[in-house]
Amino acid sequence: MRKLLLGNEAVARGAYEAGVTVSSAYPGTPSTEISEYIATYDEIYAEWAPNEKVAAEVAFGASLGGARSICAMKHVGLNVAADPLFTASYTGVNGGLVICVADDMGMHSSQNEQDSRHYAKSSKTLMLEPADSADCKNFVKLAYELSEEFDTPVLLRLSTRVSHSRSMTEVSERENIPVKEYKKDIAKYVMMPAMARGRHVFVEKRIENLKKWAEETEINRVIPCDALLGYEESGMSASGGEGLKLAGGKIGVISAGIAYQYAKEALGGKASYLKLGCVYPLPEKKIRDFVNSVDICYVIEELDPVIEDFCKTLGLKVIGKEKFSLLGEYTAEMIAKVVLGKEREVYETAKDVPQRPPVMCAGCPHRGLFYVLKQLKLNVMGDIGCYTLGALPPLSAMDTTLCMGAGIGMAHGMEKASGLLARKTVAVIGDSTFLHSGVTSLMNIVYNKGTSAVIILDNSITGMTGHQDNPATGKTLKGEATYQVNLEKLCEAVGVSRVIVADPFDLEKMREVIKTETEAAEPSVIIARRPCKLLNINYEERYDISAEKCKNCGICMNLGCPAISRPQGKAVIDNGACVGCGLCYRVCKFGAINEISGKKGGN
Ligand code: SF4
Ligand code: SF4
């Protein structure tokens, strides 16, 4: 049966069909839905882990226990999981192990644009890269066979466009894969130096064997130009001719993943393609033969010149980054311009899409805190989450964003650079991020006699990725009730005696608490607790501005709520966007803002 599946949904389906029984992940766009879809299968145990390292270790443990297992993360999550990855490459697996990593070309929701293919090479781990949903499902199933045959974890590299696009996918029944027996084998699984040296020899032999496989596998395949003439006639690419001869010779394209789709759309039957489904290790002979079969060969790959550099080490003449950008996402238009020297037609609607700059949602509980932080003119060491948007105008209340969990360590570093900075600096971190990788940094402050003030923005959910549960929400990925980590007690347990819980919408109190805690000569934690408004919207709650009472002071505009604007010079609330949080009511000094029902005071 064929189904129109999202790329991430197809990965989940592949895991299901391959007989996977254990899944662990930390949410991160664009990978999050893999786990959410996996959780819909009763046959698979699925969990959110507190971070990607834990998720990879859980999946590895399940593999060791004989199950086929999977974990998923975004590209920066693989930095966190790199430690177990590099050594799991040495130990190999028992049950098949697949690690999905979704790169975010164009940084739609990420702090950098790293290319995960480097991890495959440096950890000497097989990496497959699907180009559409059908590939996603098929490659996951293949990955389990390869993982067990070659005794290796397998990396599955995704991209935002492959993860979040839909295409037709053949679905089939689940295979019944029995859980393998666990056998104690310290030479394989205890990586102390003497054993690890032996396993390194194995890893190098494995790479040689995988290279031979990469030469033979059908997922690295040549698609001759005439094979795509029909595709081109369907009107999906620039009108084409015979395709065999253009610009004085035969055009070849080496590509993988979503870049292959762009190239195919741009060039159709005007080029022949070497579509690589395995991006590490690369098939030397196949690439050499392909380059030698065409007159001009382009390597079309987003981000880094990984395939191009490989070709050049083989002494092959290919065109790559001298014509194509190292930055961001490619488009079919851009490829057509470079290769064919002409513009492709762009659909008018694409030009008309309005810009939607990132902004905290209407009713966001973080807005009150950042409003106060801006007033206090503090240095704010930020972190990764929806609250990162507090850096943008008009709130403009965050100084840094580096990586998950970094803000707390950075605040401590600022203090050690200058005692004066300690009184003027706070760290902000979300509840989920604090549990991901903030706890250890807080412990470091206490241990090393720091005095930093840390604010945990507890909106009671993992907000940025779309409301995923975490150890502080009291619910599992499968929706079952579970133990709820008590943030206050956790902070006290690592040695913080000053732990204060405050409502970020109680602006006066929040102001006083922050002033007191930044002055304190010992570490403190302020838990700014208010659940994400989107968890429980009451559509009856709306606020409005009285044109008569409004003095046009602009204070409510400083909140940056997307429901408030000044289209004709006077502040108005868009009742369709307002979710009735009442924060604007709290800042208006002229009583101009009131709940539409007449009830005052917000919630
Ligand atoms: S804060 Fe009150 S008075 Fe000032 S612009 Fe907004 S609604 Fe008008
Ligand atoms: S009550 Fe005010 S601040 Fe809250 S969502 Fe509505 S307009 Fe925005």
Image (spheres, helix red, strand yellow):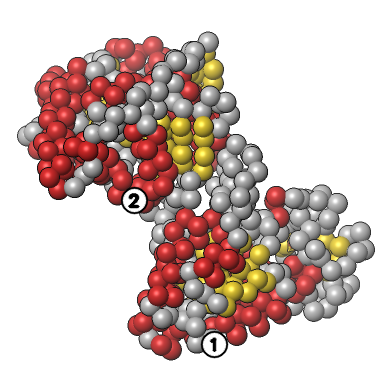
Look at 44% across and 15% down and name the residue there.
175
**Residue 584 or residue 324, whichever sits in front:** 584
Residue drawn at x 41%, y 18% as measured from the top left: 177
Could you tell whether 445 is left or right of 589 in the image?
left
Q: Do the CB atoms of the residues marked 2 and 1 lie less than 8 Å apart? A: no
Amino acid type at mark 2: Asn
* Position of 220 relative to 52 (above/below): above
- Categorize mark 2 by other alpha carbons within 10 Å: few (<14), some (14-19), many (20+): some
Tag 2 secondary structure? helix
Q: Residues within 10 Å of mark 1 (few under 14, many from 20)?
A: some
Q: Nearer the viewer, residue 520 or 290?
A: 520
**Residue at x-position 47% and y-position 55%:** 436
Badge 1 marks a residue whose secondary structure is: helix
Q: Quarter holding the C terminus?
A: bottom right
Pick whichever of labels 2 and 1 is earlier in the sequence.
Answer: 2
Q: Is residue 392 above or below residue 276?
A: below
Residue lying farthest front?
184
Write down which quadrant ligand 2 falls in.
bottom right
Q: Is residue 219 visible?
A: yes
Q: Which residue is mark 1?
A: 519
Q: Say which of 176 and 313 sits in front.
A: 176
Q: In the depicted view, which residue is nearer to us: 85 or 377?
A: 85
**Quarter of the image holding residue 274?**
top left
Residue that sits furthest to the right in the current view? 598
Q: Considering only vertical position in the picture, is 2 above or below 119?
A: above
Question: Label 2: which residue?
Answer: 79
Residue 374, horizontal then vertical, whole percent = 58, 76
